[in-house]
Image (spheres, rainbow, N blue to C red):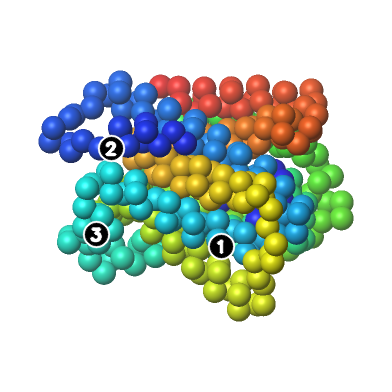
Amino acid sequence: MTNLSPQIVSFAIACNSEPMSRIQPSPASSIDGFYISIVVSTFLMGSSFIAGKILLQQGFSPMILVGWRFFVAALATLPLVFLHSRQLVAALFPPQAGLRDASLVILIGLLQTAAVMGLLFWAMQHVSASTAAILLFTNPIWVVLFGRVFHGEPLRSARLAGLLLGFAGVALALGISPAAFSHETSVTGEIIGLASALCWAIATLVNKRAALPFNSWALSFWQMMIGALAILILAYGNGLRWPDSVTAVQWGWFLWLAIPASTGSFGLWFVALSKGGAARASGFLFLAPLFTVVLAYFILDSSVSWTQAAGGLLICLALWLINRD
């Protein structure tokens, strides 16, 4: 993963635009919807690291970039909320939503946007971007283990083996070696990187079990807006500012980062979460860094080693084990 500052819109709208009373999707269509949503979501997540690296290399502040990225992404979600429900205010403020629901939405926003991204960048002040990446993408392991420990969810040996293989595959795909965790790195940064993954895992489990009265796009809006405002308050409070001069190309990369790579990826992530469950959806997060490696090869002229290719094969095997009946 690179120094990042934790779509196919028509498909997501088509999957969610009809009331359940009118259309009852078959199990097969639900499974297809899950796979399409999760693959597109992880591809867009992977592309965000490329856009983020380019902008950071050109002098953008990480916290400012993350904050405005998710602020714009949240605003871009509003038309999708309207298209989904045709009643924007009712979708964002459901009459049945109580104080408990509002508190959980704030918690998810602070965890999945503000905490995950904030901790990730804090970790990268102490460790390399690749080390921070591998720590962040241990998230699926924590989701499954927490689900087992705290909720008694079943943990088949094949799924556990798949998660461990996926972790190893991400490490190989990103070029991680054992020395990456010991040579010129800080234990503090490694702990912070793990905390980022834990925040994402907790947010995933909270969202899955909360039974919130929000559709996927409305929840995506609140999650991104709450996290963006928290990050921007911290950033501007510490004297950080948006660059005085931004070129057209930089605006293009920023808009890609904010809309397809944020609005699209997070919205489809919630769709996939609702269709496939927390453990299965989180298992596919291993695809995101794989997409990053592939995109870096074509866009950043990065080479793909045999080690990275082997990592990709391990990820494919891991996904097969995670989702094998």
Amino acid marked by disc 3: Val
- What element does badge 1 sit on? helix
Between disc 3 and disc 2, the foreground one is: 3
Q: Earlier in the sequence, mark 1 or mark 3?
A: 1
Q: Residue at x 30, y 32 (%)?
A: 14
Disc on the earlier residue, 3 or 2: 2
Q: Is residue 5 left or right of residue 282?
A: right
The residue that mark 1 highlights is 67
Q: Residue 64 location in percent, x, y?
A: 62, 64
Query: Is residue 130 at least partly visible in the picture?
Result: yes
Give the quadrant of residue 195.
Answer: bottom right
Compared to residue 154, the image places residue 102 above or below, namely: below
Q: Quadrant of the C terminus?
A: top left
Mark pair 1, 3: CA separation: 24 Å
Residue wearing tag 2:
16
**Camera-nearest residue between 291 and 14:** 14
